[in-house]
Amino acid sequence: MLVNSSQSVSLTLPLRLLAAVALAAVGLLATGLQAQTFSITDPTASSAGNYTWAPLLSASGGYLLDPANDQQTGQTADDYVSSASNPGFFMRYGQINGVDSVAFRLMENTLTTDNKGNPSFTGQASIGLDTTGDGAIDIVFTVIGKNSNNGINYQAPGSGTNDSPNTTTLGTPTLISAFNASNFSYTAVNSTNYPGWTQVGTDPDAMLTFSLSFASLNAALNAVGKPSITTSTLVRFIAFTSTQTNAINQDVYGSTGISGATRFDAPGGGFTDYTDPTGKPRPTPEPATGAAVGVLLAAGLMVRHRRRSRADEASADDVG
Ligand SMILES: [Ca+2]
Ligand SMILES: [Ca+2]
Ligand SMILES: [Ca+2]
């Protein structure tokens, strides 16, 4: 009995040490992820089909998807598209030109071109963030290609509840940055920038990508009276298109039409599952790395070993 107890104690201490080492490794992995350099034109997936951008997920599991031809105002250029094998809403975090940045990528049904046939973004696409977990949009980032404030803007939600298309109003866009080669890309989808993509309908589809620095994201949050977030804050995203800047009126990604549900946080309402700003989904269960799982397995085996030892002792006592 004494031998068993001392064995348990002597093994528990190294186990704690091992757990600490594993957690440190997890931290290093996270740091590595944040430091990774990328470009907004990087392909969505490897040639082997593994996503290098993070597909945003539904709260009920799997990729968040949006049907084709459900936008409400007639312009298929502003219709988000996806399928079970081709998710259409991605994000990525890392360094662009040495600056910590977050980027979003969306697939749209029709590529618009200028009179020379070159891709020309003339629409308006927005990403809303719920940074506080209350189901309401806290801030919106909008790329505008059609009138004043062309570029990447932020918008403050209005005084309503901002938890559904009908209850959301948006303030005047404030320009964060004009479009440039590092923060905006609008292009036809092809087998290089999205290996495995299947065209929707008869017209070429578009891939829209934009980025902003993490510092400017937080500066915008502060400007609308919201606290800053960190790379571990759990956030929900919602993507929508509009013909006007003060409301949601075209397509909500993840919702049939504008309003497949009465609230953004209801099934089919448009919110992604919670993720951190690096695109890493909410850990369930945590932690998820191989090393940490190994530690958990080892801990489980130890518990079983100790229970068995106690059971052996108990049965030995019974016999005695
Ligand atoms: Ca759609
Ligand atoms: Ca199309
Ligand atoms: Ca939709």
Image (spheres, helix red, strand yellow):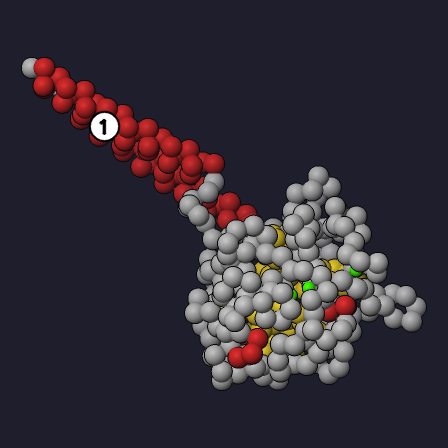
Image x and y of residue 42, in percent: 71, 52
The image quarter in which residue 240 lies: bottom right
The crowding category of the residue bearing disc 1, from other C-alpha atoms within 10 Å (few below 14, some 14 to 19, many at least 20), is few
Left or right of 306? Residue 213 is right
Can residue 21 be seen here? The reply is yes
Between 35 and 92, the residue placed more toward the observer is 92
Farthest residue, direction left? 320
Residue name at image x 50 percent, y 56 percent: 59
The image quarter in which residue 247 lies: bottom right
- Seen in the picture, residue 187 relative to 27 is either above or below; the reply is below
Image x and y of residue 276, in percent: 50, 57
Farthest residue, direction right? 116
Residue name at image x 49 percent, y 82 percent: 160
Between 145 and 206, the residue placed more toward the observer is 206
Mark 1 sits on what residue? Answer: 307
Residue name at image x 38 percent, y 32 percent: 297
Image x and y of residue 4, in percent: 19, 22
Q: Secondary structure at mark 1?
A: helix
